[in-house]
Amino acid sequence: PVHSCMVARSDDDVALAGHSQDPFSRPVRHIKGDTGKLTVAAASPHGVHVRGVVIRDYPGRGFALRDGNAGVFVDCPSDQAVVPGDEIDLYGFVVADQYNVKLEDVVFRKTGSGPPPKPVKIRSLAEALVRGYDLVEVEGVIDEEQSALGEGRWTVVRGGALTAVIVRAPGVENAGRKLQVGSLVRVSGICLVKTVSDLGSPVEKSVQSIQVFLRKPADLTILKLPSWWTPQHIAMVLGGVTGFLILVIVAGMAVFRIRLRREADQRFHGLAMEQERARIAKDMHDEVGFDLTRITRLAEQSHDKVIAEAARDAVQSMDEIVWAVNPSNDTLINTVGYFVAFAEQQLRSIGIGCRIDLPADLPDLSVSAEMRHNLFMVVKEAINNAVKHGMPKTVRLGFEYAGDILTVTVQDDGLGFDQQVPPAGEADGLNNMRGRMSAIGGEFAVQSVPGSGTQCVMRVRLKGGARP
């Protein structure tokens, strides 16, 4: 049967409409040539006879037909149903822009049927421009996913040199599948070249977009999901890392400021303490020292040896206290120098030899007043014990510094003693020496053999570091 959607346009076509002449007896022509250009003038008063295969039906509106190597939309709001794969013989009038072709006022008949035609793969804009209203296939990566009011959803797909807008009309959604930007997809559907008029020329038009209208959900296939490292996720991670780094920097700056303030306070208090220590040392030296020296001279003039000796001991004790308190002596070099001077003075004044062993080079390190005082009291006790109990001919005072550890040795060649049975009163002295070294984080060891002398070793880690 012949189906008609024709409105007569000329005397010739009036005759055709009245069936006085068979429209299908006219020569069959292709709408577009091999180059994609129209072979029939648009808006011609004469119709054209074409043959093709239905690639999509639009009930109540018409259908899309593949005419040889091109597509054409047949505008025929007829109730006569056609389906993809139907072979159609058709006569109608051409209405076209530069890229999309329509046939209006048509008569057609179905001449056969077959499988639905396969889509034509397009990879470039040039290939797309000649495929208006044809069934095409595009493969690419989803660049954007949006929703247009009343037009369903549309997706921008970029594949090589081609950018296409995939339109999913209402009712042709993806069966609940959520598309993700960055997914590799393959889509097929009817191609439409959207154009806009150029300024100053209502005839010449420029391409606005290539649109592909899906026919069914299966027309869109997800080939590969995107990597998690999409631009959005990278931006999110970079934003998070940047925010974290800013937080760390701000927190670090706050901690640094607190530390600087604390160190400044400590320096201020430390400086104030040093100034107070220096004042006390000066006052003791000038006032107490002067008084003790005067008492010593008066005792000597009165020939009172007991008072004179006690006064000299008091002067010596005061000198030791002044040395310990004075902050100008808080160095390793000054500490060692004071120990050496004390040992030589004490031993040689009573006729005992004094041997000093010093390293070739002592570092200029800070030593706290507490460490200097306790270490000196232990060395002093060791020398006094050697003189009092050992009756030595020589006492050796040795110093070593390695790996932040200062080692001080007091060794004599005197009588020695049995460590299991120390001389009366010496056990308490040894315990006091151990207690003083423990108070400054050091160690104390003693070795003695009867008839072979005694050796006392003091070790302590210097925590002061380089002297400022």
Image: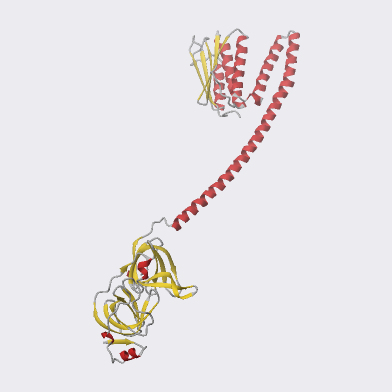
355 vs 227: above or below: above
Quarter occupied by the N terminus? bottom left
Q: Residue at x 66, y 25 (%)?
A: 326
The residue lying toward the viewer, choosing from 343 and 329, is 329
The number of discs equals: 0
Q: Position of residue 327 (x, y in %)?
A: 65, 26
Q: Is residue 19 left or right of residue 129?
A: left
Residue 272 x/y as whole percent:
68, 32
- Of residue 8 and residue 324, the one placed in the foreground of this image is 8
Q: Residue at x 60, y 43 (%)?
A: 257
Residue 177 visible somewhere in the drawing = no
Q: Is residue 124 above or below residue 387?
A: below
Q: Residue at x 30, y 70 (%)?
A: 119
Q: Quadrant of residue 215?
A: bottom left
Query: Which one is in front, 61 or 228?
Result: 61
Q: Nearer the viewer, residue 412 or 222?
A: 222
Quadrant housing residue 91: bottom left
The scheme the figure's colours follow is secondary structure
Location of the C terminus by quadrant is: top right
Residue 217 falls in which quadrant of the image?
Answer: bottom left
What residue is shown at x 35% (from left), y 76% (from top)? 38
Location of residue 146 in the rendering, given as x and y in whole percent from the top left corner: 44, 68
Q: Is residue 413 left or right of residue 264?
A: left
Q: Position of residue 6 (x, y in %)?
A: 34, 87
Residue 257 shows in this picture? yes
Considering only vertical position in the picture, is 237 above or below 467?
A: below
